[in-house]
Amino acid sequence: MRTLALFALVAALIVGTGLLQSWNTALVILNMGLVSAIMSLGVNLQWGLAGLFNVGVMGFVATGGLAVVLVSAPPVAEAWSAGGARVIGALLLGAGIIAAAALARARLRPGLRGWVVALVVLAGFFVYRAVLDPAVEAVEAVSPATTGYLGGLGLPVLLAWPVGGVLAAGVAWAIGKTALGLRSDYLAIATLGIAEIIIAVLKNEDWLARGVKNVIGLPRPVPYEIDLQSDPGFVERAAGLGLDPTTASTLYVKLGYSLLFAAVLVILLVLAQLALKSPWGRMMRAIRDNEVAAAAMGKNVTARHLQVFILGSALCGLAGAMMTTLDGQLTPGTYQPLRYTFLVWVMVIVGGSGNNFGSVLGGFLIWFLWVQVEPIGQWLMVALTSGMADGSWLKAHLLDSVQHMRLLTMGVILLLVLRFAPRGLLPER
């Protein structure tokens, strides 16, 4: 009953937004709430199920966003002709250099190993840059105001969602192989640093996704509003509902995204529940509660940590691809730790770590508050300062401080939950 009551409360908040503000705003909150719920579900797999402290969520979300560009954006033929093949060749060369260094480290004796690996890496780096740099300059010189990058494969955008999960899983595998043997605090530092590296690559490698110039106009899985407005049948149906074509088309598109996102969330939630109640899920909780005892029972703790780390990161990458599809553009400058790491952790903690339904609830509730706190704060500050004289420095200061209400509110909510419900609104059973 508590679970149903809390989800009913969230539903009432979203419906109330539609009735009191606009249904367009309500659907915006619903769509990003669905995406945020998937992100928090991925973090809950890592923390709630295995006790892995991953503060690099932002990097995996950005990797999923990059997948949308690589899969669905149309290829830039001129850029490929100018240096596309050389860029791919340079990347393959870099992979070969890394493989050669790993092979030398595995095969050579300890006294010689370090010198050979250092020589391979150092010489390979200069060779790699000598091949890559001219190719990148040639690609970025092709109409830099509009393209200046290689583009993607031009495939349907829905294919980019699982690809985003696969790319994030690949990055998680690389991180996990090197960092999962570390202590929890060192793992947190490693994941945060690697997430910042991913964002730096997206911002500076224009040939990949235009860097800070952004990639706009990405394909979408739902119709465009202008196409709906030019359809006589749609206009007639909108008029029958008492809506003008512009409003009806906007609501139709957002509702289409809601149905797609909800279907993905339901599938992932069912799979997460099956995993939680399976022997694998019980084993992961046993490892989380006592790694020494689990290892004594013959469980490979590091391998199981790697499994769940990859699964949780894949969900974050999938959510990142869905979010970029919803936005219709990739903007690397908007990936901030506050939004894509701290806020997701607040969702998991408030909802209830270890409980999949709690993570989903936290995703909806915290995102609703993140969106609505500022307008509510504006109304509250206007009411509080209504009796102050116009031109008062205190009144101006209070009104200007409304933009900081989000951070204050998130901190207060987190403190209240940790004080009065330390296991979250829906605790783990």
Image (cartoon, rainbow, N blue to C red):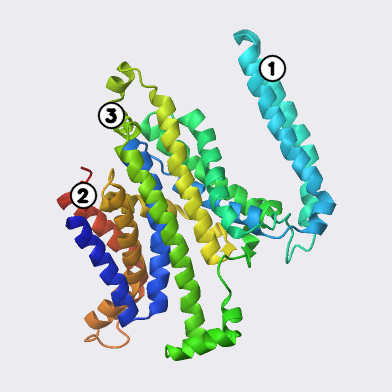
Q: Tell me which corner region of the image, top left, top right, bottom left or bottom right, holds residue 282.
A: top left
Q: Nearer the viewer, residue 205 or 115?
A: 205
Q: Which residue is mark 2?
A: 418
**Residue 112 location in percent, x, y?**
66, 10
Nearest to viewer (mark 3 / mark 2)? 3
Nearest to viewer (mark 2 / mark 1)? 2
Q: Which residue is mark 1?
A: 116
- Say which label, 2 or 1, has the lower sequence index: 1
Q: Which amino acid lies under the numbered mark 2 shown in the image of this protein?
A: Leu
Which quarter shows the C terminus? Answer: top left
Q: Would residue 51 be seen by someone viewing this image from the given angle?
A: no
- Mark drawn on residue 286: 3
Q: CA distance from mark 2 to mark 1?
A: 52 Å
Q: Tell me which corner region of the image, top left, top right, bottom left or bottom right, holds residue 231.
A: bottom right
Which quarter shows the N terminus? Answer: bottom left
Identify the residue shown where x is 47% and y is 91%: 239
Left or right side of 191 for 144: right
Q: Judge whether 10 appears above or below 63 on screen.
A: below
**Residue 217 location in percent, x, y?**
63, 68
